[in-house]
Image: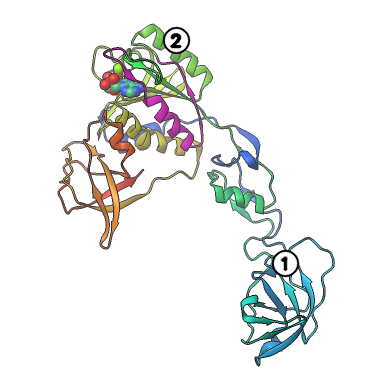
Amino acid sequence: MAEVPYFISLEEALLITKTVGLNLESEVVDLDNAHGRILFEGLSAKVDDPPFDNSAMDGYAVLHSDTTSPPTELNISAVVQARGTTTLPTLVSGNAIQIMTGAPMPPGADAIIPIEHCEVKSDSIRIQIEGKRHFIRKQGENLQIGKEALSQGSLLSPSRVGLCATMGHWQIKVQKQLKIAIISTGDELKSPGEELLPGEIYESNAFGLSGLVKMMGHEPIRYSKVEDNLDGLRKTLDIAAKECDLILTSGGVSMGEWDLVRKIMEEEGRMKFWRVKIRPGSPPLFGEWKDTPIFGLPGNPVSSHVVFRMIVAPWLIYATGADGPTPTITKAKLIDQVKSTNDCLTLRRVTITPSEEGLEARQPRHQGSGNIESLASADALTLLKPGQSGNIGETIEVILL
Ligand code: AMP
Ligand code: MG
């Protein structure tokens, strides 16, 4: 245990995690399953966007030179709808072609008059305004064929999935999701749905961590909870190390006699740090179990969640080269007093509301690290540096949840 960095700053902890990398593999998925996945390679447009000049409005395609001295009377010579066609009517001077949003521009036309500016009669229109050469969406104005619009590592949000489709891709190469083991430890834990005996509580960390893993674009594998005994823990860690790319444990990393995750890592694992200067969440450890990276998260529900957000999530982004999800850090004025610490980055749970002077942070809840409700009802965590006051009226940094 002698050389393992102990009770280090968050920055040091993050640096140490970056000494451990991952082997990334790829797979091809349909667009239907692309949301939340990470692109394995850059993606280029197979077509121009838009693929042809088209109208941005419902209205009439006209010759601009016909409309320069309103009012203008024009005959309606044809109709063009938004649909695939190989024949388009040509516009000749003195005429207008009725056109729908997204329909290709008829040859000869160089302006669109929106329908709201036209007085429509049975076979002619009267235009009261001077036409302009706008409301035409030009071929390739958004994207040109061959342009790489999404780079390797892009986390596919809904709009990015839409962009993949616009570029003509139906199947895309993404990173295989990491399989992330979640192992809860503790004799007192019962699954929700079961009856609690005196002294027992419901196991909640694995469910919260599972959601966080999915939020990062990966696959959580929840293992049956492990009782506080070394043999059971070793067996589960061995299985998880074989089956998964990363192991998360919860509980058993403090200084107590039954804190067996810490103990087994000290004796049989490769521990790279233990304890970090953040509060809540100071007990975590990081290392490798049989060559699989492992984060030992604290058992207190708020702590396990906070450590995931502050340490595990940044490492996952680093190790996969993903461009997100990145949390927003912003400033807010404290409306309530927030207790800081002298040695740790203090991460209190606060609600955030806008005001005319900017964002305001309030701390309405009891801040115990066992109080998951205080996290569920919070919008952000404070980023109070060691010794920073946390007084009412102070503007501080917060990280949005
Ligand atoms: P430990 O780190 O194992 O000492 O646990 C610290 C506190 O967190 C104790 O009050 C545990 O009962 C509680 N705890 C540990 N694991 C979980 C879990 N998976 N879900 C909810 N609470 C837990
Ligand atoms: Mg425990």
Of the residues under marks 1 and 2, which one precedes in the sequence? Answer: 1
Which image quarter has ligand 1? top left
Query: Which residues are drawn in magenta?
Result: 197-225
* Residue behind mark 2: 235
| Vertical side of 35 occupied by 237: above or below | above
Residue at left 64%, top 60%? 143
For the residues labelled 1 and 2, the Cα–Cα distance comes to 64 Å
Residue at left 18%, top 47%? 336
- The residue lying toward the viewer, choosing from 134 and 264, is 134
* Residue behind mark 1: 103
| Vertical side of 297 occupied by 148: above or below | below
The kind of residue on which mark 2 rests is Lys
Is 303 on the left-hand or right-hand side of 96?
A: left
- The residue lying toward the viewer, choosing from 140 and 109, is 109
Q: Where is residue 369 shown, x and y percent of the image?
A: 25, 30
Q: Quadrant of residue 315?
A: top left
